[in-house]
Image (cartoon, helix red, strand yellow):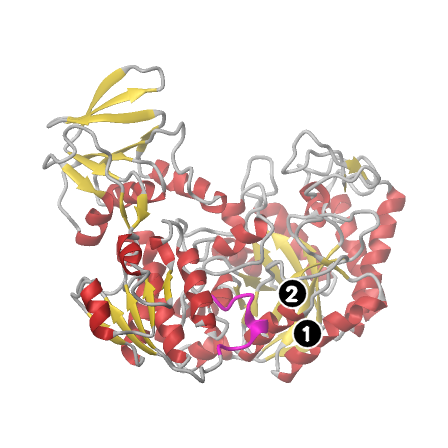
Amino acid sequence: MAYDKLFEPAYIGNLKLKNRLVLSPMNTHFSIGEPSVLAERYFEYYKARTKGGVGLIITTHVKAEKDIDPYPLSFGYATLDSASQIKYFYEITEMAHRYDAKVAIELSPGTGRLADTVLEDKWPVGPSENGLLGMPDVKTRELSKEEIKKLVYSYGKSAGLAKQAGFDIIYVHFTAYLGDQFLSSVWNRRTDEYGGSLENRMRFLIECIESAKSNVGEDFPMIVGLALDHGFPEGRELEETIKIAKKMKEMGIDTLHLRRGSYDNMNLLIPTEYMEDGVSVEYANIVRDKVGIQVITDGNISDPELANKLVKENKIDFIGLARALLADPDWVNKVQANKKEDIIPCVRCMQCINRVTFGQYAACSVNPYLGKEYLGPIISTNNPKNILVIGGGMAGMVFALLASNKGHKITLIEKSSKLGGHLLEGAVMDHKKEVDSFCEYLVRKIKKSNVKVKYNTSGTKELVQKYKPDALVIATGSVPIIPQVPGIDKANVKIATNILKNDEKIGNNVIIVGGGLVGCETGLHLSQKGKNVIIIDMLPEIAQDVIFMSRSSLIQALHDKGVKTEGGIQLIEVTDKGIIVKDLNGDMKELTCDTVVISTGLKANDSLYEELKEEVEETYKIGDCIKARKFIDATQEAFQVAYDI
């Protein structure tokens, strides 16, 4: 087997796992009700991944109690504090066991400074008085020793209920939340037996484990989740984590889940596309070797060759997969069958997390079924239609595949010689290798499907009249916005998307006009090719349209490559030597360069839809031809139309 090490059985405590592939804990916001419960959406979400071959599921965050620390209130975390909750969890564990998967409950003793709001009658609490991460002026109340004892008792009680609910492992969640805050001197400044020395700061963790063991038994398997380091000044460093790990081993814990970072440095905790693969592996391996303990780690380890190599070389013992399994729940089975090319790759766009952060269900840019597993598969149609799809970009391809699988007869019209649309531009950048993989995946699927593709063909009224389709889907995408200023048609002016897609030649000194996502990523790409790059934008700061999870990481990557940025600058004119700009004070100045790159946004290319919408009674438009947006919007719209048509 090509990836044999990933499929060797392993043990956590006395529990045997069929392989070394773990669904890492991730909140997808699929819970319902108040109090929140893991109902049908979560059940089907986990079912898809257990059927997909994963050896161990670590659930989403579950709270042990909600009386002392009821937070967060907006992320749908379930609480296992009474027998009335058991049935919801038992359905999940019972189902997973049918597919020979094991399940760990990610059990948290509290939230602390990560509280998302404030209830006057239940003020946020913590080991000491600390500003809330999202509201620094609001301080947590220091927990009394009596309250700490109640939290410890509740933790053990909840662990006992988890055992009754069929869980195989208690995952002691001491990363980022209240538990981590007790462990770390930056947040724990107590002067009693729960603060001060590391021994004292570990007391809450030790007591939670002992309380859990008193309810589940000494030999019941446990995993402890810890931050390797916090990734910010004064935060915990690796050396102290090694000491904590040694204490865990003394207590009989044989497996740790280790990740770098914290919510104060989320790019380490949940690494973006601009970061290296396996960002936590080196530190996790140090803990493994110095302590002699098994480790699970994750963070951009979605390539099966890398994953197998890490286990084979004894760097880590288990591979944690989170976003990779959101993108493709069958990742494990496909790897085991040596069908890497069939894996739907996660493109690390962070949209899954971004949606949850803003109160929505998690969704995926490459897997439109995520969160919709409960709807069941798309059912074959009893009324197959001849459908003409105009536009072979992401939206057009995704729709064509889904509708074809449903039994419709699809003809896909593409004006160029290649399918891909804006995916082709994104795929050329070094940090976009997953976008390249996804584009290739879609093209391969199209070629293997019953979809008929017509290349180098423009969508026109005459074409539609010739095909006489039962339904027409317009997916003509978006086109660059070109600022109408003097000199815009000079030879030294290039369009960002054209540079990326066609590898057009440019000079060594480049000014990019427009500091949105496309402009910034073009700047990063050109700097990696050795160009001297300046990015300017009318807004005070660049990357304003980049989602918050990725923005700081992108800006850091630009800084590391020496890209200069300047906000509050408006393009007035292009000259033979560069550009003339105006700042916020109205002052004019000239900036010199060899090449001016225009990246001032995209606009919907909807003229064909407007021309044809009356031509066919059943006409739809999807993707950027509605409005220039993100990949995820194209996928979701393609799914909805394919599901309904």
Q: Is residue 168 visible?
A: yes
> Number of numbered discs present?
2
Image mark for residue 92: 1
Residue at 32% in and 20% down: 583
Q: Is residue 323 left or right of residue 263?
A: left
Image mark for residue 484: none
Real-space CA distance between mark 2 and mark 1, rounded to the nearest whole angstrom = 10 Å
User: Helix, strand, or loop for circle 1?
Assistant: helix
Q: Residues within 10 Å of mark 1 (few under 14, many from 20)?
A: many
Q: Is residue 228 visible?
A: no
Instruction: Choose between 92 and 599: the one closer to the eye.
Output: 599
Q: Position of residue 302 (x, y in %)?
A: 44, 64
Specify the principal SS of the magenta part. Answer: loop
List the single residue furthest toward the right: 146
What quarter of the picture does the N terminus occupy? bottom left
User: Helix, strand, or loop for circle 2?
Assistant: strand
Q: Is residue 427 left or right of residue 296?
A: left
Asked whether the residues under the numbered discs 2 and 1 touch, taking CB atoms below 8 Å apart as contact, a structural biologist would say yes
Which amino acid type is shown beneath numbered disc 2? Thr
Which amino acid type is shown beneath numbered disc 1? Ile
First along the sequence among labels 2 and 1: 2
Find the magenta span and give its range. Answer: 367-378
Residue 602 lies in the magenta-colored region = no
Residue 371 lies in the magenta-colored region = yes
Which residue position holds label 2?
A: 59
What quarter of the picture does the C terminus occupy? bottom left
